[in-house]
Each structure stands twice: as structure tokens, then as C-alpha cells.
Image (cartoon, rainbow, N blue to C red):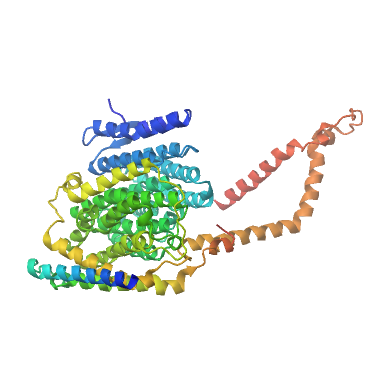
Amino acid sequence: MLFHPAFPLLVVAFIALAVPATCRKVISLLAPIISAIFLFLLDPETVYHMSFLKDYHLLLIRLDDISFLMTLVICLITFLFFLYTWHQTYNMQGVAALVYAASAIGSLLSGDWITLIFCWELMAVAAVALIWLSNRYAFKAGFRYLLIHFFGGNLLLGGIVLLIGQNQYVIGQLLPSQGAAYWLVLAGLGLSAGFLPFHSWIPDAYSRVGLGASVLMNCLTTKVAVMTLIRVFPGDQNLLIMGIVMAFWGVLYALRENDFRRLLCYHIISQMGIIIAGIGIGTPLALNGAVALTIGNMIYKGLLFMTAGAVVYATDKTKLTELSGLAKQLPGVAFIFFIAALAIAGMPGFAGFATKPMILSAASAAHMDWAELLLIFAGLGTFLSIPLKMGYFLFLAPPKEGQENPIKRKIPIHMYWAMGILTVVCVVIGLFPQILYQMLPYTIPYTSYHIGHILQECQLLVAAALTFYLMRPIVKPHAGITLDFDWFYRVPLRNFFLGLSKGIDKIRGLFWDDIIRMVKKASVWNRNPYRTFAGNTENQPVSFDPDHYRAPMLNNVLYPILVLMVILILIYVTI
Amino acid sequence: MNKKKDRLVIVSLVAILAILLLLELVFITPEGHVIWHTLPFSHAVMGILFSVIFILVAKPLLNKILMRSEHYYKDKGGK
């Protein structure tokens, strides 16, 4: 018997709508475990198809190493999301989270374009629901997320329609020779992966969602997008250039950020950039590196979002200028933060050292020396922005003069449990990277643990730490925001539409009195057309006239018909 | 007290870096086809150089171009 791993999540999402809060939390916690069991029950290389239209079969499951590994980690993160948010009983965000995780798994396992686009759009809708349900003040950010992702989804759909027109139903590699389909699919997937200049939705939405929701969101949309890019555009040089630009852009903005949740969000863009550059390099080692770095990011970046969430939960503050010296008040959180931060920076002994160097080694082996140098450069920004900037100013810097104890509430034990489990995973991958390497798509002997590499990496990081410490008055956070590409649609585009709307309203105002007069005259006729055709109606009873107080019904029918006729005529004339 | 602590941190980092450089001379035989693989202490130099560039570009330079008040978007009528 074959079950789709997304199935338990969707079933529990429906059941959760109808059961009390405690029961909902318990079954939500169990759902990802059942999904993981279903995943293990699938045979390797499973392909499950379902008849859809004439000559078309939906490939609901096409299991390979990448989809297996990603689905497994999504199940883990979804489980930890429910453990982390166990104290929250006030809304239905869990239902949205289950559908979100299910659609992400559906996208990863899909083998054909139609299944992919269905799961893709469902993922966008569920993510928006999660944004709105996890934080009621994030309405506008959710709306911007919706606009961007529906735009991206439509680009992807356009590409898929063209691909199906070319009889390419199964998801596979695309080439520039396929014309518009190639570019539309690249843009659609890239938009969800955080391609510049459409990346601003990541800090905009992820920094505003609920504390647990940011952990889940970090691990789904962008990661599913890059995994799809691996399947469709391996070795594409456009991705190498885009990846390097993203890697720099993300860390530069992360270094500037004062809001530490936004700092982590900008850093996602940088890490996505390095992964996308790996896909662009395209050799088996680089693709292994891209998958390993994606898995690593889901784990240690998820852990960073958990620690950031724990700080916000305890203090109600998100600004580095408002907090400092938290290592004394929150030693457990500080300890976990530094494990995750050193992991993401690639410190030997931590998970990042097992994942990131694969892409650098692949660039070197492929003689893309400039790419290797730029990725080393951009990767150093990670160390500067997270362990050094965020770690120092949030946890280690001396408390500001007159600063009161910022701790307002105790962090619940289940949050520590969730962070603890992910910390163990992070450390185990760091110490025993072969566990991860065995699950990667290509079998290539690789180890980052050799004396030369360890010494060079340590030199790089210690030299950067020394420079940071000497230059920390310059890096010190300041209150303020940094303009990004979202400025274009938040200020000039908004003003353009407001101006357009006002202009149209002004024109309408000029003719409004005439329109009203015309409608009133027409209404007299519309109210009782019989009067016109039947001539004298004096003998009809006049004591009660219900039409006197209600809008003429014919208005509702006549005007749409007239408008439709005008549109049809215009279309006819145009075509 | 703070100056003492600062000095201790800096001296510790310099000492660790010096040990790492010494270990590189002892244990690593340079190999590769590009300068940052063959030149001794190249990663320490890159660590310092790249960090200085990052910090100067990210803070003083971009402050002048992109920094705005926290209420910038609210003042513009949005949120």
C-alpha cells in the first residue's frame, strides 16, 4: 500500500479544524512523525502516477535522494515547530503550518509540472495564511508576500503551459534553447528562491511572522525553490552570477540591520546565493554541496530563528540597539545561539564546516577561481554578521548605561526542548559529516576535515574576529532602516496607483452629475417598462408602490449587459 | 576595566592567529594553481582585508546612500 508523505499532514489539518486546542496540538505534533514513517515506507526510486487527462499522468511521487532528504528534514522541522509553539493556543496557525508543510513536501516529491504548480500555489496560499494567522499585525506584509508569490506562480504557470505545449510533461533540465519557457520557469522559481531584485519579500514577511512561524518559513519556500532549481537548471551559468550577487547583497544588508530577525532574514538571501552559485557550477560535487548547504541551512538557520524567537519572547524587543549583554540573563539561549552561529559561519567542528566548503572545493576543482574567491569573500560576511555582530551586540557587549533588566517572562521549557533537539542534530552533522554525505545525490568521496583546510578556515575566522573587534565602533548598530528594492513598490509604485486612482476619480467627478441624471431618467423607464409599452396605466392601483423604495431590478441586468456588449465589440474590432 | 578586557581579547586573538600561522608553516605544503592557495598566510590576509572592506562598505558608505529613519515608510503613508 502506498501513501503520500504529505497525506497525514493534510488529514490532520482538516481534523484540527474541528477539535479542541489541546487535541489539536497533540495530533499536529504527531502528524510529521507519521509523514516521516510514510516516507520510510516508500521504496527508493518510487514513482507513483495517477491518470489526470487524456494522455496525461500526474507523477505525484518521484522519490530520489534529494526529495527523500528534504522531506525528512521538513518533517523534523515541522515537528519542532509544533513543539516550539506548544504554548500558543490562540489561533489556527497550526492548520496553516500543516498545509504549508504538506504542499512543500508535495512540491519536492512531484515528478510532473502540473503537480508541481498545484503544490506550488497551495504553498503560497498556506504561507500567507500562516503569516496572517501567526501575527495579526503582519497583514500588509502578508499581502505583499501574496502579490509577489502569485506573480511568481503565474510566471511559472506560463512557463509550464509552454513546456506542455512542447510535450515536456516531466520535470527535467531546461535549456536556453527552449526560449520563453526556460526564462519563465527560471523567473518563477527564482522569485521564490530570493533572486535579486525580487528578494525583499524575505525580510519583509519572515521578520514579521510569529516567532515559530519564522522557523518553519525559513525551511520551506526558499529551500523548495532551490531544490527545484537543482532539478531544472544544474550547471546554468546565469545562476552562478546571480548566486554570487545574492551572496554579497544579503550579507551587506545583514551587517547593516538593527532588527536581529531582519538580520537573519537578509542572511537567508546570502546563503541562498551560495547555494544557487553551487547549482550554477553544476558539477556533481557542487550539486552535492548545494543540497548539503540547503539541509545545513534548514537546521542551523532554523536554530538561529528559534534563539531569536526565544529572545523576543523573553524581552518583547527585536532591536540590537535596545538589548545587550543577554548572555548573563539567558545563558542557555546564548549557548545554543553560538553553536548555531559558529555552524553557519563554517567553524571546524560544526555543521557548516561539513557543508559550505563543498561548494568552494567544487569551484576550485572546476577551475572557476574567481567564483571560489568571491564565495570565500561573501562567506566571510556570514561570520561578521551573525556570530560577531549579532552575537557580540546581543549577548556579549556590556549592558548599556541605565539599561533595566529586559527579561519580561521566562522562556517555556518546550522551547528549550525544540532548540535542544536541533542543536544535537547540528553538532552531530558537524562531528560526523559522513552521515549527511551518504544521503547526498552523488557518491563522491569528500571530507572537509584535513589539517590544511582546518588551519586555513581557522586563520580566516580568527583574522576576521580580530578585525571586527578593532572596528566594532563602526559596526555598532544604529536605529534606522536601509532602503532596498521593495522601496520601488512601496513608494513610487504605490504613489503611481494612488495618483492614477485620484486622476480617474477627478474625471469621474467632472461628469458625475450628468451620469446621475442619466441614470435617474433611465431608472424611471427601467422601473416599469410595461408603462412605456402599454401606454395608459392610470387604472392600475397606486396606493402601494414597492418599487418606489427599491432599486430598479433591470439596472442590475441592463448595465452589465451593455458593458459586456461594449467589451465584446472592442475585442471583435481589435482581433 | 573595559580597556583591560579589550586588551586581553585583542592579545588573545593575535596570539591564536600567530599560533595558526606557525602551524601553517609547519604542517601545510602549499599546493594549487592560484595565489590564495599557494601564498603563505593568505587566508589570514584575506580574513583581515575582506573584513575591512565589508565593514567599510556596509556601514559608512551605505549609511550615506541607503539609511533612513525607522518611520520612513509610515511617513510616506504606508506601513
Q: Residue at x 32, y 39 (%)?
A: A75
> Looking at the image, which is closer to me, A423 or A162?
A423
Which x, y percent locates residue A169?
32, 41
> Relative to A118, does residue A193 appear above or below in the rendering?
below
Which x, y percent locates residue A521?
82, 45
| Residue at the extreme front of the image, as rendered | B1
Picture quarter containing residue A539? top right
> Looking at the image, which is closer to me, A75 or A561?
A75
* The N terminus of chain A - image quarter: top left
Q: How many numbered discs sit on the rendered protein?
A: 0
Q: Residue at x 82, y 40 (%)?
A: A524
Which x, y percent locates residue A573?
59, 51
Q: Residue at x 50, y 63 (%)?
A: A488
In the picture, measured across the screen, residue A559 lies left or right of residue A197, that is: right
| Residue at the extreme right of the image, as rendered | A538
**Residue A408 seen in the current view:** yes
Which x, y percent locates residue A221?
38, 47
> Looking at the image, which is closer to me, A360 or A280?
A360
Q: Residue at x 58, y 49 (%)?
A: A571
> Relative to A514, does residue A107 appear above or below in the rendering?
above
Picture quarter containing residue A36? top left
Picture quarter containing residue A8? top left
| Residue at the extreme top of the image, as rendered | A1
**Residue A301 seen in the current view:** no
